[in-house]
Amino acid sequence: MEIFLETERLLLRRFTEADVDALVELDGDPEVMRFLTGGKPTPREVVQDDILPAFLQYYARFAGYGFWAATLKATGEFLGWFHFRPHEGASLDEPELGYRLRRSAWGKGYATEGSRALIHNGFTELGVRRVVASTMAVNIASRRVMEKSGLRLVRIYHESWPYPIEGSEEGDVEYAVTREEWEQATLPHDRSTPH
Ligand SMILES: CC(C)(COP(=O)(O)OP(=O)(O)OC[C@H]1O[C@@H](n2cnc3c(N)ncnc32)[C@H](O)[C@@H]1OP(=O)(O)O)[C@@H](O)C(=O)NCCC(=O)NCCS
């Protein structure tokens, strides 16, 4: 098992060909897919023939970027995934953060824990300049994770979307954090001795 990052409770590792069932199950929950496909599950053939192969090819193309399977350190349970990689056509030092976790794993701070570790690694090891993330305006949990991970709202935008759900008319939101902002918020500010 190739571990990419370790946090207090999580391991982020590379996907392998053995992860088809876990991904089919993850994308099979309409609640997980609500803001992604309007709740439609991803067919097994698509996971097997398109999604997983794309995840696997990523590791060869970019060191440090890609899709990472998240497991619980204590039990090895598959929780879902994170991605950290430049959006199609975007600059290499401006990766996009994303996450998708099984419903049983929600509400325990895992998405925030994994996101913070990826952001930290990006700024300290990968030469990242700015991290971006986007979601539907009505996806409050996802927005909260972005905020708790240090990203701030940049813009609201409207794109045509093939899976309209209640609230899609509110559009999408883009969040971001620059290296300077992250350093200011994370690193000790004033090391001068008080007098
Ligand atoms: C988005 C997602 C990854 C969040 O995972 P998570 O591990 O539950 O996130 P965290 O526990 O770190 O934080 C979630 C925060 O959202 C809040 N939240 C969740 N649902 C909420 C809701 N309906 N209204 C208000 N706040 C909500 C939680 O209270 C928590 O904030 P808090 O710590 O201030 O209380 C998870 O819900 C998920 O996988 N959703 C389906 C896939 C998805 O939509 N991915 C994002 C697409 S861009």
Image: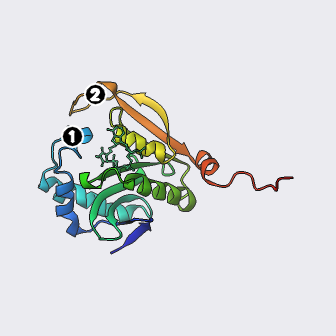
CB of mark 1 near ligand 1 (< 8 Å): no
162 up-or-down from 8: above or below: above
Q: Which mark is on residue 37?
A: 1
Mark 2 lies on a secondary structure that is loop
Residue 167 numbered mark, or none:
2
* Residue depicted at x 27% and y 66%: 77
Q: Which mark is residue 146?
A: none
Q: Which image quarter: residue 178?
A: top right
Residue sitting at 60 percent across and 52 percent down?
186
**Label 2 sits on what residue type?**
Gly
Q: Nearer the viewer, residue 75 or 183?
A: 75
Helix, strand or loop status at disc 1: helix
| Three-letter amino acid code at the position of disc 1 | Thr
Mark 1 surroundings within 10 Å by alpha-carbon count, few (fewer than 14), some (14 through 19), many (20 or more):
some
Q: Give the residue furthest to the front.
A: 195
Instruction: Give the vertical position of 85 relative to 134 (above or below).
Output: below
Rendered location of residue 3, percent (x, y): 39, 71
State the scheme by which the image is colored: rainbow
